[in-house]
Amino acid sequence: MIAMAANTKPTFSLLLLARLSATLVAILLLSWALYFTTSFLPHTLSQRDLIYSVLHPLLMVIGFILISGEAILVHRWLPGSRKRKKMVHLWLQGVALTSAIFGIWTKFQGREGVIANFFSLHSWMGLLCVSLFGAQWLMGFLSFWHRGEVRMTRIRFLPWHVFLGLYTYGLAVVTAETGLLEKLTFLQTKGVVLKHCTESLIVNCLGLGLATLCGVVILTAVSPKQYQSSHTTKVVNSNSKCLTF
């Protein structure tokens, strides 16, 4: 039992670090979006356009990246059966996908039009990321509910599911980083934001927070499991006695 408890410490530490990183990212993003609204749209535009402009980063970072990251970590902390973990994982990923779709939808609502908002590397990467995520979620949904599959097929598909999931998550974080860089560079070029000011510091810290969160989530996901769940018999040798529990 002592060995088992010791083995859970690395996973607990990673989960704690992931939660702290996600909390920091959320606080920094909310601070930027709520206290520096003039950086998102000029005063000459309507309040409606401002709301859509602020909603985009909130939905894509908090709704998409943070929730999908939590969905990846479900298999590490949620107790219960494997079916329960898969159901919660699928549900959280569905919420993340919905947030991403609405996040892209907000860019269609501006006065500048659709084409004006989809010309940059950031926008192209975003469309690719959400498309891959949607296809990945659909495959997972069909795999979860279709019980007639051959077990070997499911086993062969699992490594690809894990790889594509982590790749898409990493791509989402990189896309967010390009969005932060694009936004901050534009504001500094126009003279709206100085290079050495509070807003620039918040955006830079937000980028570092996202990078840290991505690394911790992926490391937690690929780290070997320390112990098996229930339905496994463990044998511990203690004082030359064999104890089964």
Image (tube, rainbow, N blue to C red):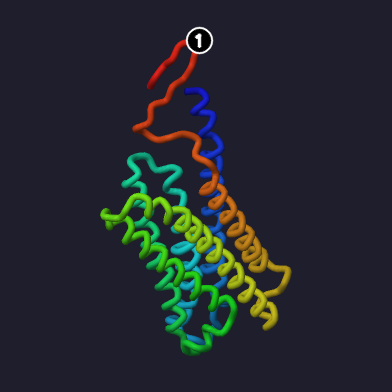
Q: Position of residue 173 (x, y in %)?
A: 56, 63
Q: Is residue 101 above or below residue 10?
A: below
- Under circle 1, the secondary element is loop
Q: Which residue is painted at 49% across and 75% down in the image? A: 127
Which residue corresponds to mark 1?
A: 239
Q: Which residue is painted at 30% across and 55% down in the image? A: 149
Q: Is residue 41 above or below residue 164?
A: below
Q: Which residue is painted at 53% across and 61% down in the image? A: 167
Q: Quadrant of the C terminus?
A: top left
Query: Relative to residue 139, is residue 194 drawn left or right?
Result: right
Query: Relative to residue 5, is residue 136 drawn left or right?
Result: left
**Depth order, front residue of 172/99:** 172
Q: Position of residue 48 (x, y in %)?
A: 42, 81
**Depth order, front residue of 217/148:** 148
Q: Which residue is painted at 59% across and 78% down in the image? A: 121
Q: Quadrant of residue 139?
A: bottom left
* Total labels drawn: 1
Query: For mark 1, does the 10 Å Cα neighbourhood hold few (<14), some (14 to 19), or many (20 or more) residues?
Result: few
Q: Position of residue 200 (x, y in %)?
A: 66, 68
Q: Amino acid at mark 1?
A: Asn
Query: Relative to residue 185, is residue 225 drawn left or right?
Result: left
Q: Position of residue 49 (x, y in %)?
A: 46, 82
